[in-house]
Structure formats: C-alpha cells, structure tokens
Image (cartoon, rainbow, N blue to C red):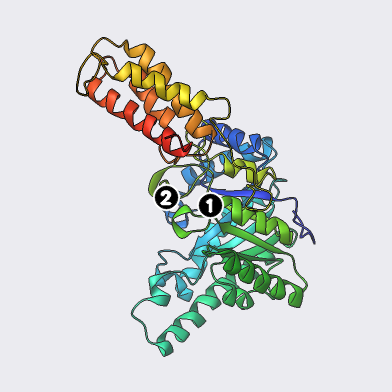
C-alpha cells in the first residue's frame, strides 16, 4: 500500500505466520473484535535452510491474510538475538536475495500495509551488554549502516509500498526517520506518564519529518503496561497501534496475548478496549456493585452453611450426606456473585475451579468442602456481612 498520511484506522496485533487452516482460525478471532492488521516476523535463517519450502509457507499465509481482509506488516529482519556477522557487508548479497523472494511474495499483494525493515535493531546484547561506550558507538554505526542499506534496497525494488522500522526506544527514531515513510516506535512504560512521554516524543519526530506515527508494539502484563490503558492512551493521541500479541502461547504466553487456541480470552477488558470500551477509573463517577442488595449473598452463605455443617453436633463437623451436585450449584452461585461483583481476582476464576470439580469422575470431598468454605468467607468479606 502506498504511504498514507493517516493510519488511524489501524487496530493491529503482533503474531507469527501460520499454516492456512490455523491462520484462518486465528484471523477469525482477530476480526471478531475489530482487529484489521497483523505485524509478523519473517525468518531469514529458516528461509536460507530451505528457500522453496519457506517461500511457499509465507505465500500461503499472505494469501490467507488477503482473503480475510487483514492488512500485513511483514518484518524482514529482527534485532533481538542479533547475529553480528549479518552486519558485515559480506552478508548483504545474501540478505538481498532473501529480500528479493519476500518482495515477490508481498510486493503486489493488496493486503500489504507496509514493510517493517527491522524489528528493534538496537535491542540486543551485541549493542547493550558488556561493551564500552566507544565500542557501542562503533557497533551502532555498523548497525545503522545495515538498517539503512536495506531500507534503501527495499525502496529501490518497491518504490510504491510504505516502509518503516520498529524501534524499541524513541531516541533511535532519528536514525531512520529520513528514509522511512512511517515513524514506528515500541513502548512498554509502566505508568501513564511514561506512556504519554514516549508518545509525545514519537509525535515530535513525526512532526519534524512530516511523517505519520505508529506504536507497533505495546502491552505486557508483566511490565505494568496493561492492554486497556495503553490502547486508551494511544486512541487519545490518535496513534494507531499493534498490541503484543494475538495468541496466548509459547514463550510469551504467561504475559502476552488476547486469545487462547479455543477462542476464549484471558481478560475481557482487552477486547473491550479494542472496541473502544474502557474501565471507569474515576472515583467521582464509579458505582461499586452491591451483590447483596437483594440478600442473595446472605442466602448463599446460609445455604452453604447448612450444606457443609452438621448442626446436630456440639462441635463443628462437616455434614456427610450433602449431595455433591447440590453443593456445587450453591458454590457456583457464590462464585457468580463474587465475579459479577468484581470482588475476586480473575487470574484463576472461581467458576473455572467449579467447572473443573464438575469434570472430575470422583470429587475429592475434602477439597470440595474446603473451597466451598473459602467461597463463603470471600463472599461474606466482600459484602461486609457479619
């Protein structure tokens, strides 16, 4: 796609190329919540091992994106885990051959939004670890020569489609700003102030060079960089974005991702934010839930007490003849009140544990009763019931 002045329509995710069947399913999840673009890593090393097989695989993925009306941002090179040998000019002809094959796949594909020449060029041990300031400066010069060479190479072969470079720090944007069509930065700041500061720094570079700005990598639960917060702030600046990442899987699955393989989600606030619905964080207008307004919480607590304890005993004793199904029904009601009233962590939802109990061929009654008791105590505490 030729360079645009406004990319504000973009709502993107980072991901990986997949076989057509898997890609079709994953892109279906993405489209369900309004995602319209995918940024993904290509693998020059895998390509070099078997060019024909890799080209066929990527071509199929690109076609699946096109038929699903999802635009693409293929990443040609990756700065993470950088092999310094590739920065030598001796590698350039090999890199160009790889680029030529990628050009044949994407150049005339109408779903191509832009090329990302390199992901986070300076984010690697070669640049940042155990290196003197002088040596780092020398290595950075070599790095930028590589990046700028391939920016120019892609433009020379494909003068129509836009190019960008996904920098992981805004201070590096100036290294390629004169060559790219779109200014792209990444940000995983821990607070609203940090997110806004990075956005304003990137916008300043965009204004200086007269080019649009995109945040093409953001959001991580382990970096205090919540999806809903980052999306809301980007929307306030009219900066298009790509969250990291679409699927909950692999190395990053514990801290990144929207969808599980079956199409369920980790946190409904993420798709809500993507569709423009954000959590109320204003104490002046926030209306806390009152799950016991109609005495449902008290009623559930009393039923759990009757189902769990034997009143004929002088001391506490678990009732032996309570039906498991009846107890699970009451536990589910307690769990629903806790979840709907936002009184409990949803990291492992109480209802998930109850569904797991139901799947067991033979329930562990001691474990079941203990969790029923825990639910009653959480409900009593959350609703301030003495």
Residue 145 visible somewhere in the drawing = yes
Q: CB under 8 Å between callouts 1 and 2?
A: yes
* Residue labelled with disc 1: 244
Residue 364 visible somewhere in the drawing = no
How far across and down, in percent of the image, does residue 187 sit? 56, 64
- Tell me the residue at 51%/61% (across/down): 77
How far across and down, in percent of the image, does residue 132 sit? 38, 87
Q: Which mark is residue 113?
A: none
Q: Relative to residue 177, is residue 59 depicted above or below?
A: above
How far across and down, in percent of the image, does residue 353 sit? 37, 28
The image quadrant of residue 201 is bottom right
Provide the secondary structure element on which disc 2 rests: helix
Q: Which mark is residue 252?
A: 2
* Front position in the image: 138 or 358: 358
Q: Could you tell whether 347 is left or right of 2 in the image?
A: left
How far across and down, in percent of the image, does residue 152 sit? 65, 70
Which class describes the residues within 10 Å of circle 2: few (<14), some (14-19), or many (20+)?
few
């Amino acid at each position: 796609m030729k360079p645009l002045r406004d990319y504000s329509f973009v709502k993107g995710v980072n991901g990986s190329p997949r076989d057509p069947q898997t890609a079709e399913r994953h892109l279906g999840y993405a489209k369900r919540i309004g995602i319209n673009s995918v940024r993904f890593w290509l693998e020059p090393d895998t390509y070099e091992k078997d060019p024909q097989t890799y080209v066929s695989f990527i071509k199929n993925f690109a076609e699946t994106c096109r038929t699903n009306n999802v635009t693409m941002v293929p990443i040609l090179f990756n700065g993470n885990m950088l092999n310094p040998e590739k920065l030598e000019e001796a590698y350039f002809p090999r890199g160009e051959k790889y680029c030529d094959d990628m050009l044949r796949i994407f150049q005339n594909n109408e779903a191509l939004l832009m090329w990302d020449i390199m992901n986070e060029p300076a984010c690697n041990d070669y640049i940042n670890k155990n290196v003197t300031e002088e040596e780092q400066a020398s290595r950075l010069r070599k790095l930028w020569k590589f990046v700028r060479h391939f920016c120019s190479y892609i433009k020379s072969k494909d003068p129509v489609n836009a190019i960008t470079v996904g920098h992981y720090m805004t201070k590096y944007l100036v290294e390629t700003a004169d060559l790219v069509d779109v200014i792209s930065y990444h940000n995983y700041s821990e607070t609203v102030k940090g997110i806004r500061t990075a956005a304003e720094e990137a916008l300043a570079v965009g204004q200086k060079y007269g080019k649009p700005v995109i945040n093409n990598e953001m959001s991580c639960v382990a970096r205090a960089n919540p999806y809903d917060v980052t999306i809301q702030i980007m929307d306030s600046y009219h900066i298009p974005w790509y969250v990291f990442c679409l699927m909950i899987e692999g190395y990053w699955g514990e801290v990144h991702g929207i969808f599980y393989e079956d199409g369920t989600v980790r946190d409904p606030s993420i798709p809500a934010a993507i569709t423009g619905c954000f959590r109320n964080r204003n104490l002046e207008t926030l209306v806390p839930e009152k799950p016991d307004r109609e005495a449902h919480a008290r009623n559930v607590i009393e039923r759990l007490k009757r189902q769990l304890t034997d009143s004929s005993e002088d001391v506490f004793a678990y009732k032996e003849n309570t039906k498991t199904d009846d107890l699970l029904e009451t536990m589910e009601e307690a769990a629903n009140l806790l979840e709907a009233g936002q009184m409990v962590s949803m990291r492992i939802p109480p209802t998930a544990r109850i569904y797991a109990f139901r799947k067991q061929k033979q329930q562990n009654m001691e474990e079941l009763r203990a969790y029923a008791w825990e639910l009653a105590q959480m409900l009593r505490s959350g609703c301030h019931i003495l």
